Image (tube, grey):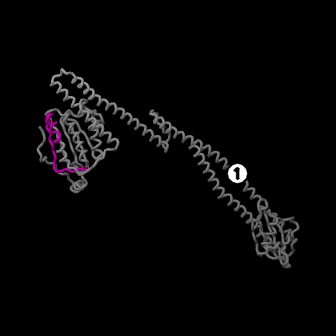
Amino acid sequence: MRARVVLLIATVCAGAFAIAYLGIVPELASTLERNRLEQLERAMALTAPRLSETMRASGTSEASRTIHQLAESFEARVAIFRADAGGTRGSTPSLVDESLSAPPAQFARAASIALSENRQVALVSGRGAQRMALVARPFEDAFGGRYVVVYGRSLDDVARTMALVRERGAFALALALGFALLGALAVSQALTGRVRAVERAARELARGRQPPPVPVERDDEFGALANAFNEMQERLTQAERARREFIVTASHELRTPLSSLGGFVELLQDEELDPETRRRFLATMAEQVERLQRLAVDLLDLSRIDSGELHLEPALTDLRELAHSVASEFEPAIAERNVHLDLRAGATTLAWCDPERTAQVLRILLDNAIRHTPPGTRVRISVGRSLGGERAYLRVIDNGPGVPPDLVRRVFEPFTRGDTSRGAGLGLAIARELVERMGGRIHVRSGGGETKFEVTLPLAPADRATARRDGSRSPLTASRRPPMGT
C-alpha cells in the first residue's frame, strides 16, 4: 500500500508538471517571438517615412547611414538588398550595404520574399542559435531602383530564457517530487499503521485471543473501519460468552434429569422394592424423560431459529378457533392441577400468521400459566382486536405468584426461570422469536396478583382495510362455547 501511495502521488505530480509544461512553455516561446517581431515592425514603421525620403533624395549610401543610426536605437541589425534586373520570384537579391559584414542567410531570404510579394513581410527563420526575427520592406530610389531593407534581431535571448525556464522547471519538478515523496511516505506510514493495527487485532481474534480495542485516532474512513471492527469484536465476544453460558446451562439442564434417572435405575435394580415404591419411581422417571424430551425439542427449535432454517407459512388464521383447539389439549392438565380455565373470545378474529407456530406460542404461555398457578385459581385466555383495530391479540392471564421484578426484563431470554424446579427456561425465548418473525410482539405485565402475557399479531390484509374504513374495532362478546374449567 505504501509503494502504491508513493507511486500514485509521484505520478500525479509528474503528470501535473507535464500538463503545465506542455501548456505554458511552447506558448511562452511563441509569445516572446511574437513580441520580438512586433518590436521590429514598430521600428520599421517609425523609420519607413524617413527612409523613403532619404532613398529618393540622397541614394543608398545616405540611406544606409540613416538606417543604421535608427536601427541601433532598436538594438536591431540592418541589411540593404537590391533587386537584380530581371530577377524572378525566389531569386536572391544583391547585398548593397557594405557596412554590414556577412549578414546571415535569413536576411537574404526575407529580402527575396519581400521583393517577390512587393510588401512588408515579418517572419521567424532559422534554428537553434541562428533563429532570428526578421522584418523586410521594399523601397524605390529616385531612379526607380528597387531595394529591400531588412531588420533582424537574434532570438538567442528567447532561447536562453526558455532554457532557463526548462532548467528551473526541472529543478522545481525534482523539488516537488522530493517533497511529494516525503509527504507520501509520511501519509502512507500513518495509513498503513492504522490498517496494520486492525490487521493485528484481526489475527489475534482469529487465533482465539481477545485483543484490546483498536484505537480510533480520527473521525475518518479508517476511524469508521476501526469502530466497525471494535463493534464486531464486541459482538463476537458477547456471542462467545452467550455460547459458553448456553453450553454450561444446557449441560446442567441435561445432567440433572440424567442423574435423577441414573439414581432411580440403581434403586429399581434393588429387588426388595415394594410395588408401590416401584410404581412411584417409574412415574418420576417418566416425568424426567418427558422433561428431557421437551428440552431436546426446545433446543432444536432454538437452533433452527438461530440458523435461519425455521420456515414460516403465514395464512389467514382464526384466532378464536385456534384458542379453542389449544385449550382443549390442556383439559387433562387443568383437571390434574385443579385450575379453572376461562376462554373469552368475541366474533371471528382473523390474523395473518403461521397457525402451527401461533398454536405453539399459545401452548407455551398456557403451559407456563397452568404450571405456575396454585390449585383453585383461574387462568384466562382472551382473543380480540386492539383498541385501534389495527392488530389482533392473544392474552393469557393467571393469578399465580407472578414474575419477580428482577426477571421481568429478562423473562424472554433463554434459560431465564423464576422457579428453578420447573422447565429449562427456553419456552418464552422460543415464543418471542416466533412471534417477532411473524411480525408481532409479545409483552408481559406482572403485579397485583396477576400476570398477563399478551401476543399481538397483524390482521389479515382485507380485515385490516375494513378496520381502517370503519374506524372502530369489533365488539368483544362472550364466547358461544361455555367457559372451560373444572
Tell me which corner region of the image, top left, top right, bottom left or bottom right, holds residue 407: top left
Residue sitting nearer the eye, 276 or 322: 276
Left or right of residue 125, residue 470 in this image: left
| SS of the residue under disc 1 | helix
Q: Measured along the vertical axis of the image, is residue 236 above or below residue 31?
A: above
Q: Which residue is mark 1?
A: 168
Q: Which residues are magenta?
A: 327-352
Q: Looking at the rendering, which quadrant does residue 99 occupy?
A: bottom right
- Comparing 86 with 192, the one in front is 192
Other-residue count near label 1 (Cα within 10 Å), few / some / many at <14 / 14–19 / ≥20: few
Residue, x 25% and y 47% (percent of image)?
A: 354
Side of 8 where 94 appears, left or right? right
Q: Quadrant of the C terminus?
A: top left
Name which residue type carries label 1.
Answer: Arg
The image position of residue 52, as x and y in percent, is 81, 74
Tell me if residue 6 is in the magenta stretch. Answer: no
Residue 88 rendering spot, x and y as whole percentages:
81, 76
Q: Position of residue 314 (x, y in %)?
A: 27, 50
In this view, 269 is above or below 104: above
Q: Which of 40/368 is in front? A: 368
Residue projecting furthest to the top: 272
